[in-house]
Amino acid sequence: MSDIKEVNEPYWFEHNTNLPTCADLLDHMKLVQQVDLKYPIILCSDGRLMDGMHRVIRALLEGHQDIQAVQFDTIPEPDFINIPADDLPY
């Protein structure tokens, strides 16, 4: 758990020009409560978190020292580049 650097970064709000509101934090708290820790987090080849911050936070809240993780050997090419999230087909 201590190797996950993103815990000390503005992970959910890094592209936000405004500081997060209490409502923003509440939305994330709800998601943290809903996650299932049986699913591993996903790390890229250099160990950075690609998916699973809500699981990381839940594990930390519950006092876990470790979390299941899978890690890519190489960083895969993105499916889409410079596409607004609302325009993605999924």
Image: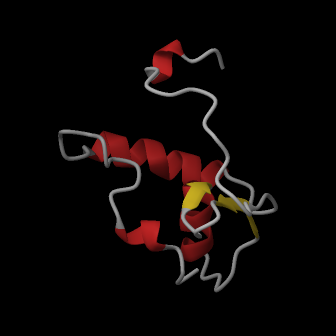
Q: Quadrant of residue 38?
A: bottom right
**Left-right relation of 60 to 35:** left
Q: Residue at horizontal 30%, vertical 41%?
A: 15
Q: Residue at horizontal 64%, vertical 64%?
A: 45
Q: How many marks?
A: 0
- Taking the view exactly as shown, the residue that stands out farthest to the left is 18
**Left-right relation of 69 to 77:** right
Is 17 situated above or below 83?
below
Q: Residue at horizontal 51%, vertical 13%?
A: 87
Question: Which quadrant, please, contains the C terminus?
Answer: top right
Q: Which one is in front, 16 or 48?
A: 48
- Horizontal and vertical percent for residue 65? 64, 86
**Left-right relation of 42 to 5:** right
- Horizontal and vertical percent for residue 80? 57, 26
Judging from the image, the colouring scheme is secondary structure
Q: Which one is in front, 61 or 72?
A: 72
Q: Which one is in front, 76 or 33?
A: 76
Question: Which quadrant, please, contains the N terminus?
Answer: bottom right
Q: Residue at horizontal 74%, vertical 63%?
A: 73
Is 48 situated above or below 84?
below
- Horizontal and vertical percent for residue 34? 65, 49
